């Protein structure tokens, strides 16, 4: 995994936040997934306004930009064109709707626990309810196990959970 500090559009290298805000979040993080997938897979992430803009940008434009950036990062004359590209568009995904949880400026340490707290026979799960692994797939999975145990406990009594779950 490696990150990319985006330069301002006008290339003045100004320390002012507003000068680089237009590029903030654009391909800010790369994951090399070769070890886990057994294939040469690179995942590039976007956030904020850049992610919203990418929703409407043709895949070919995104690929051209990212290959140019990778060539620049690794000081190559040009970066090879990927054999296959998958551009996820979370904003159009009816299940994700473009977001995962994050802590806002007014967040408190107990907020994840508050989100996980059931109301009557309604129980909540999802990565936003897992304080130990928020904004992750495994946080969503672990919170699902926790919520399922809460449902069973409500029906049949206490169910011991290993402490490894942490949600």
Image (spheres, helix red, strand yellow):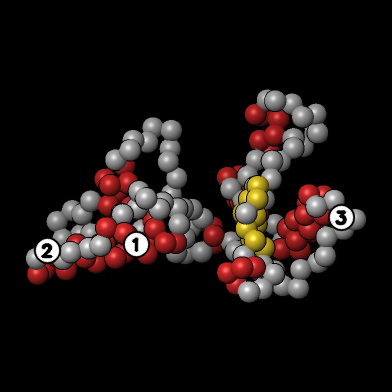
Residue that carries the numbered disc 1 in the rendered image: 142
Q: Secondary structure at mark 2?
A: loop
Residue 75's disc number = none
Residue 154 pos. (x, y %): 12, 64
**Which comes sooner in the sequence, label 2 or label 3?**
3
Left or right of 63 on screen, residue 133:
left
Residue 146 pos. (x, y %): 26, 61
Residue that carries the numbered disc 3 in the rendered image: 76
Q: Secondary structure at mark 3?
A: loop
Does residue 150 sit above or below 135 in this rendering?
below
Q: Residues within 10 Å of mark 1 (few under 14, many from 20)?
A: many
Q: Secondary structure at mark 1?
A: helix
Instruction: Measure the C-alpha gap from mark 2 to mark 1.
Output: 18 Å
Question: Which of the 4 image quadrants contains residue 121?
Answer: bottom left
- Say which residue appears at 12% left-offset and 63% top-offset: 158
Residue that carries the numbered disc 2 in the rendered image: 158
**Which comes sooner in the sequence, label 1 or label 3?**
3
- Say which residue appears at 27% left-offset and 58% top-offset: 163
Question: Which of the 4 image quadrants contains residue 167?
Answer: bottom left
């Amino acid at each position: 995994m490696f990150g990319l500090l985006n330069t301002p559009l006008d290339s003045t290298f100004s320390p002012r936040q507003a000068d680089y805000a237009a590029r903030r979040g654009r391909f800010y993080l790369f994951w090399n997934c070769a070890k886990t997938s057994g294939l040469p897979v690179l995942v590039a992430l976007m956030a904020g306004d850049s992610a919203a803009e990418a929703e409407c940008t043709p895949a070919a434009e995104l690929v051209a930009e990212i290959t140019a950036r990778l060539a620049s990062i690794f000081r190559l004359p040009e970066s090879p064109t990927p054999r296959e590209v998958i551009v996820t568009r979370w904003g159009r995904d009816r299940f994700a709707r473009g977001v995962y949880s994050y802590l806002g400026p007014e967040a408190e340490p107990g907020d994840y626990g508050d989100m996980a707290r059931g109301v009557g026979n309604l129980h909540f799960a999802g990565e936003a309810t897992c304080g130990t692994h928020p904004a992750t797939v495994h946080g969503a999975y672990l919170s699902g196990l926790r919520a399922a145990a809460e449902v069973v406990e409500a029906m049949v009594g206490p169910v011991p959970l290993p402490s490894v779950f942490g949600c």
